[in-house]
């Protein structure tokens, strides 16, 4: 079995694994290992909050230390993933495909995202306090003063944003660059989640230490975010791209607004972060049914994504073979 068949089979098996069993244990989860490295490296790069305001030299040191430690971690992640993929593609297909799936699965996560968002809605049915407590597992914002509607909006926003960051983007880079691409993206996204803050968090000042990580994630997420929005728009026939783009640009992030705007417009609901942005302000306040509609919509997108990704793997392999024949013919 050739490499494209192994890669395609691994992707399908990983998707089935995700839906059936969800995430592996933390002890063997590569993203947890990435997080441990980033936690250690962050303490080296980010000064204690008490040190601000830092002099210019301190800011430069913090930025370059953060950049160097990011590149070091990314290089190790890429190298290990490249080595493992090389070993597997030289193994028999019946062994390579399931092992490749086992390595790919932790690099994307749909089942846990789906379940956590619906768990927020179930908690809201008990009380606003329970809903806030459950939402705190999903978002980093302060949830203590959110109303019932705002809790639901935040959960739907997290669903849309993480559909891009946790599912579409890793599989996008897997199709283009194989296992190393998916691993590098997951490292970059984890680094942004841990370091990419515009001020203080956890007793440290991240404005400069996390700037490289934030920009790297922006670059790697740029195309996947728009692809996610396109898939969501395709699932909602009649959603106009111009309208989607106008809403998406209301958010501070260059990427997260795209899938969130697509969900807001597609379902006809208002999604907002208090004091920051309001998406589809003419929409209605989301209710419990809307959370389930959003989850179903995103589940359909994941299914289409897997099918499209498998087709893309074979198309890229075919295109590479054609270009190789053309180049070889030209050399003759």
Image (spheres, rainbow, N blue to C red):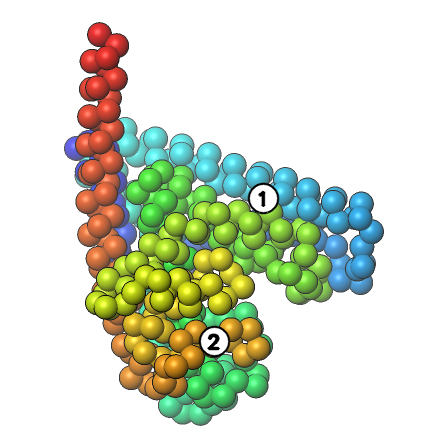
Label number found at residue 278:
2
Q: Quadrant of the C terminus?
A: top left
Label number found at residue 321:
none
Q: Does residue 138 appear to the left or right of 111 in the view shown?
A: right
Residue picked out by circle 1? 70
**For this rendering, which residue is in front, 57 or 99?**
57
Q: Does residue 312 appear to the left or right of 55 in the view shown?
A: left
Q: How many marks?
A: 2
Res. 233 in view: yes
Q: Nearer the viewer, mark 1 or mark 2?
A: 2
Label 1 vs label 2: CA separation? 33 Å
Tell me residue 109's x, y (percent): 36, 59
In the depicted structure, whether residue 285 falls above or below residue 205 = below
Indicate the secondary structure of the residue bearing disc 2.
strand
Residue at position x 33%, y 85% in the image: 288
The crowd level at tag 1 (other Cα within 10 Å; few <14, some 14-19, many 20+) is: many
Tell me residue 224's x, y (percent): 37, 52
């Amino acid at each position: 079995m050739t490499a494209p068949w192994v890669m395609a089979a691994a992707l399908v098996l990983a998707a089935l694994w995700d839906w059936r069993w969800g995430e592996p244990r933390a002890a063997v989860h590569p993203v947890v290992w990435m997080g441990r490295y980033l936690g250690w490296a962050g303490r080296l790069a980010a000064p204690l909050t008490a040190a601000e305001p830092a002099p210019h030299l301190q800011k430069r040191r913090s930025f370059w230390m953060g950049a160097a430690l990011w590149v070091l971690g990314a290089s190790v992640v890429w190298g290990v993933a490249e080595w493992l993929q090389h070993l597997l593609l030289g193994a028999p297909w019946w062994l390579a495909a399931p092992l490749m799936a086992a390595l790919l699965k932790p690099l994307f996560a749909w089942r846990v995202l789906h379940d956590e968002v619906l768990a927020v809605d179930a908690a809201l049915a008990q009380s606003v306090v329970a809903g806030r407590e459950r939402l705190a597992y999903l978002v980093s914002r302060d949830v203590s003063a959110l109303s019932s509607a705002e809790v639901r909006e935040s959960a739907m926003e997290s669903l849309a944003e993480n559909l891009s960051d946790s599912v579409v983007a890793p599989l996008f880079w897997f199709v283009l660059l194989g296992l190393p691409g998916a691993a590098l993206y997951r490292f970059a996204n984890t680094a942004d989640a841990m370091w990419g803050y515009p001020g203080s968090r956890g007793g440290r000042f991240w404005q400069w230490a996390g700037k490289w990580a934030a920009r790297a994630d922006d670059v790697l997420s740029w195309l996947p975010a728009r692809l996610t929005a396109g898939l969501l728009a395709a699932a909602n026939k009649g959603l106009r791209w111009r309208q989607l783009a106008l809403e998406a640009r209301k958010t501070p992030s260059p990427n997260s607004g795209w899938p969130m705007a697509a969900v807001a417009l597609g379902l006809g609901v208002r999604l907002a972060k208090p004091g920051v942005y309001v998406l589809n302000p003419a929409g209605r306040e989301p209710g419990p049914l809307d959370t389930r509609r959003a989850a179903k919509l995103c589940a359909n997108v994941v299914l289409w994504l897997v099918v499209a990704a498998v087709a893309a793997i074979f198309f890229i392999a075919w295109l590479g073979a054609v270009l190789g024949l053309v180049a070889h013919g030209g050399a003759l």
